[in-house]
Image (cartoon, coloured by chain):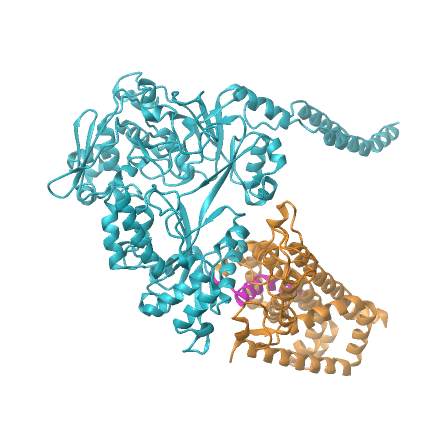
Chain colours: A orange, B cyan
Amino acid sequence: MEAHHVSNLLVALLLLGAAATGRALWRNRLWREALTELWRRRRLSLLTIALFISVGLLDSVAWIGGEVAGEDLLASHEARSVIDRLFLKPAEGSYSAPFATHTFYNKQPLVAPAGHPFGTDILGRDVFHRTLKGVRVALLIGGFTSLIAIPLALLLGIRAGYFGGRFDDMVFFVMSTLASIPSLLLLIALILVLGRGTWQVCVALGITSWVGLCRVTRGETLKLRELDYIQAAKALGVSNGRILLRHILPNLMHLVIVTFVLLFSQLVLSEATLAYLGIGVDGSWGQMIDQARTELSREPVIYWNIAAAGAAMFTLLLAVNYVGDALRDILDPRTLREDA
Amino acid sequence: MNRGNLACCACALLLLAGCSNNPYPDADSATRTYYTTFVEAHRTLDPAEAYNVSAHKVTGLVYDTLLEYHYLKRPYTLIPGLATEVPVAEPLADGGVRYRFRLREGAGYGDDPCFERGGKGRRSREVVAEDIAYQLQRLADPALQVQVREPFSRIVGFRDFMTALEARRRADPAFAALPARLQYQQLGGIPGLRVPGRYELEVRLSEPYPQLLYWFAMEFSTPVPWEAVEYYDARPGRARFADHPVGAGAFQVVEYQKQSRVVLERNPNWYGYRHPDAPAARYPSEGAPGDAALGLLDPAYRGRPVPFVDRIEIRLDKEDIPRFGKFLQGYYDVSKIIKESFDQVVQSDRLTPEMEALGVRLQKAVSPSVFYLGFNMADKAVGAAAGARGRKLRQAMSLAVDSARFIELFLNGRGVEAQAPLPPVLAGYPEGYRNPYRQVDLERARRLLGEAGYPEGIDPQTGKPLRLSFDTYATSSQVLLQREFFVNEWRKIGIDVEIANTTYNEFQAKLERGAYQLYFYGWSADYPDPENFLFLLTCDMRRIPHNGPNSANFCDARYDRLFAQMEVMPNGPERNAIIEEMLAILREERPWIELFHRIDYSLAHEWISNLKPFGMSHPMYKYYDVDPKRRAELRAARNRPVVWPAWALLGVAVLGVAPGVRTFFRNRQ
């Protein structure tokens, strides 16, 4: 099975999973209220995120064949995504400004006059296209890394907080050690060991970013386990596993969601830093910014590469942070109770 | 707190009074000093070891050589330096050759305390032939990291001397403890080097090797005083000899701060003052065509004794943008053009009006270098094993790469499209040579690819586009972008080239294993002879198994035969015919896709004269002249301090503090 088949399948599974989760949440009264409240408060941000996610998904659905741009003989043999198929114009000569009709330096007429809303880069590729392709990479980095970091943090944090003892000491020692190594150095070292590539960067970021959430979960669990209802459950002989799942975990969910949101934006930014050091992910906004960094000191300045990537990153992260902020207010059991 | 603020204001006022951005002491501005830069701290300045541009900027001034290059003539021509004339090879009965050098009498080393060993108060010593023999023995010393042993190993007994030295040192600790000079003496020196007289040196080679003379124009073969090596390396705590150069050049180091600057002044004992008629001791009176128009043959300088400047200051300045800024302010005399500012400085291949108003001059020179994409000929798909199919594949890929566009996009046009591994500035380059496989022709490329068995780029074995890997060690995304350019070119003929980007070490490991298909490399000439480029593709230089620089692993018996013939021939039509034959082999075989020869653009201020870009890393500063008066005037005019922002800031600060002061006094009352 080839890479694009896997990707297509994953998209299908993801959509099914999302539908099922959505249905389950909608059936639950509390979640339904929370989601309605979120929609009421952050309509624009939610729409923005939905837009980004759909671009990311459209960029993940790919197949071979179809119409091909220009002189590229290879394109007809490659899996190209829905997004790729929207940009069928061949590459231009070199830089051109947004909506320009001629190239920037030697004023050659463009293949697609006024057809590049964000201009073209040094190799004449459409910057709008590259920016859209960056969405998938950003979501992948944020999402996949969170998938590594959050379960790890929850597992260790809850166990350490609830049971304490030797295990707690150990977890705390590992956390303190990791937290005292400058994270950038650790990242560089990890990537040196793991090698370059998307998954490697995600794993490295995951290893360096679980500590924060773990610390918070551990602290919160320490507090929760002393509360009356937990003590009552214990006295009634409820098993530890059941207490963790039914009483502790739900009460940590608001923390998880808030941390996920903050982590997501922090990860996308970290990748940009790594890209600046030349060890980022191919096709990311960080890489676009890195490739364009000398363009800003050109005369006349070439701003559109950096501006497009920067604006896309900014918009996504702002929307995510906005939603996260609202979610925290809505999901915190205490604030919810006050509202009700 | 208020008092603190007042103190700050006072400080700011004091600073404003002596405001200047001049990095040099004011007293220096009247001296005839040439200011330039180096970009990395020198690891070593030992002439046997130093082998990079930054280090040569110093060693090239301090260490004079037996032979030198003519400053103006192109193709490059050798003239006598410390030697009285350029020797001629004398064939010997055993198939070897002999060169006899005669040194100029009365040449002296720069002043240095190490010469006190010859008598109290002595600061210098005469250069004798023994000193050159000593340095050549040092080149054979395995304890030194010499990167250029290969050419010198043609001296009779050079390798044996090296192994004998190593063996004896291991076997005999007492011997190993002796100063290196005595060790060399006890072993009887190198048999191929004889010093029949105080000023005479005989070099015997086991085989003819005309390029040896170029190596006698490089610092590796300079006379080195043994006193300096022993004085500086004997005792820990003293500067190492590698940090304290002592030589017979026109300049001597008077101040050396590794991390900030090197200051050189004239060497009063230089041979040029004793022998003003020596060709390398005076400004040339003839040059290459066009030099007169560039003002390089000014009657005020023609035939006059050099050096013209008294002092040279070389500063460490690592960052491009500040370095260029200081050049524009007039604090460096010359500069390269940085990529970021290129469009500010040059437009449509001419200086911009702003630059012309500054009185800056633009100079261009094609450097003796070549940048290329290499195929690994040891590879199954693209290499020699694929026979005619592989050849056609390489030809097709060569036809698809548009180096003119690459030069325009990534080099700001600073390059000449390469037609052959040879740069056009060398003697022996066929005039007007055009390589049919280096002209972009996609039609033909696709046809050839079909003939190679990959119709439309489809590999019949997999039914998919042919997949090749382009192995690189690009660290920055910007370099990666350049690699992507080539990948896009090959997409046009349907070949799927994947960039395999690794660290430099991994890349080196791949080269050793032979696990690569395509790579990007460059080569800069050590000396201006076609041999120095064509040897890169001989069998003996293959990466596998010889670990040589022939990373293409190209090996062709006929090419090697021609090379062996060409290598030992003097320049001339016969040699050129052989070179053309060799280029014809490369043209068809395509182990390389030659991309470009760099054009070095440099900028110089109006107060500096006689500047001609040299192309190789030899500092030619003794021919330069500066006009310190004009420089001081222009520096002052261009660096008038802009004071109003400081006053404005001060005003804001005062306004900010005033209410506080008022409250303070009111409360006290």
Instruction: Tell me which segment is drawn in magenta.
Output: A193-216
**Residue B594, position in %: x, y?**
41, 54
Q: Position of residue A189 (x, y in %)?
A: 50, 57
Residue B347 rendering spot, x and y as whole percentages: 59, 42
Front-lying residue, A214 or B653: B653
Which of the pair B443/B426 is nearer the observer?
Answer: B443
Residue furthest out toward the top: B121
- Please name whichever residue, A45 or B70, is drawn nearer the observer in this view of the structure: B70
Q: Relative to B272, does residue B516 appear above or below in the rendering? A: below
Q: Is residue A268 above or below residue B90?
A: below
Residue B273, image x, y percentages: 34, 18
Is A254 located above or below residue B90 in the figure? below
Point 87% across, 31% down: residue: B667
The image shows residue A191, relative to residue B151, as above or below, that is below
Prevailing secondary structure class for the magenta stretch in the rendered image: helix
Name the quarter where the C terminus of chain A is drawn. Answer: bottom right
- From the viewer's perspective, is A124 left or right of B469? right
> Left of A312 or right of it: where is B91?
left
Q: Is residue B264 visible?
A: yes
Question: Magenta includes A213?
Answer: yes
In which quadrant of the rendered view does residue B199 lie? top left
A298 or A219: nearer the eye? A298
Q: Is residue B414 left or right of residue A249?
A: left
Counting every numbered tag in the picture gives 0
Q: Quadrant of residue B76?
A: top left
